[in-house]
Image (spheres, grey):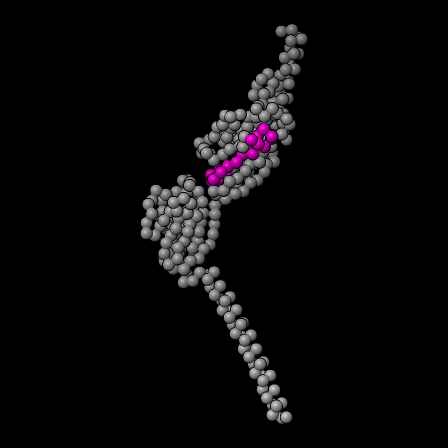
Amino acid sequence: MTPVRKRHWFFILLHCFLFGSLVDSSPLSSAASFLSITSTVGKQVVLPCSWKSRLGQVDPPACHIQWKTPDSTVFEQWGKMKWQAVEFQGRVEVPEDKLGSGDCSLIINDVQIKDTGRYESFMVVNGVMSEKTRVFIQSVKLSVFDHKSLQSRAPGEDLVLDLYTSHSVRVVFQGRNSSEWSVLWMREDKDSQRLEKHPVNEQLTIKRLKRSDDGIYKVLDELGLAVSTVQLSVEEKSTAQRVQEVTENQALADDAAKSSCSALLVLSVLVLNLQRLYLL
């Protein structure tokens, strides 16, 4: 190979190396800064992404976006062609009408505990010698938490448990004085006299509560992860009712005291006037 040709190939390889370093400067394993997004199970989250901040102007039809986790690809879209990972099937999208203007944000619907993790977006572009190259765009850390609540009901009342998502498959119960968990409801169960699944909403109603229903209720997903935790107190009267009753009784007592004072004042004035008339 002649010296001229050697120099020619050297500059080509150097150019490829520099270009590759530029577009691959922030791989998944890097410690680059990232955004933090938090949510609770069942909601919609948006993982922000703007490719124009990295690439400037690109012909919209050439937009080829990838969203990945450290383990696998979550979503990929190139023009009209789209691909979703099985575990995200039907739950993820990048709005096509916004992609051309630079917004490559990933929308995750019905977010789950298992979706917690780190996500990174890449734009696939034509590199040197028509090679496809991934350009890092954005890193986002997503944290998904379960729902927690304290509730109080009186015996005979109903408890409506929110299931939050179609991925909730069972409800388990632990009595207040017990260390054992028992399965209260499974998604395939039919309605009973005391348990009724709403025909449309993700809600389960426990009817006619008893004192023995006092305890902790957990809604679990397919992996056994907690979607929600409800600590229930079954008392003669709920806390809210007692507070309202105390407030109303106090108001009645205040009104009675005011009325009593007013009556005494009127009586005193009347007696004073009668004394003056008698002296005259």
**Count of numbered badges drawn on the protein:** 0
Would you identify the image quadrant in which residue 270 lies? bottom right
Figure check: 84 above or below 156 = above
Residue 75 appearing in the image = yes
Residue located at (64% from left, 26% from top): 57
Residue located at (42% from left, 41% from top): 166
Residue 29 appearing in the image = no
Left or right side of 188 for 5 = right
Q: Is residue 59 magenta?
A: no
Would you identify the image quadrant in which residue 121 lies? top right
Residue located at (45% from left, 45% from top): 164
User: Over which residues does the magenta segment extend?
Assistant: 97-116
Image x and y of residue 115, in percent: 49, 38
Q: Quadrant of the N terminus?
A: top right
Q: Report the residue that reaches farthest toward the bottom.
A: 279
Q: Nearer the viewer, residue 258 or 116?
A: 258
Figure check: 67 above or below 176 = above
Q: Is residue 101 magenta?
A: yes
Image x and y of residue 98, in percent: 57, 32
Q: Quadrant of the C terminus?
A: bottom right
Q: Nearer the viewer, residue 73 or 197?
A: 197
Q: Report the residue that reaches farthest toward the top.
A: 2
Figure check: 114 above or below 181 = above
Residue located at (54% from left, 72% from top): 254
Image x and y of residue 150, in percent: 46, 54
Image x and y of residue 5, in percent: 64, 9
Q: Nearer the viewer, residue 92 or 183?
A: 92
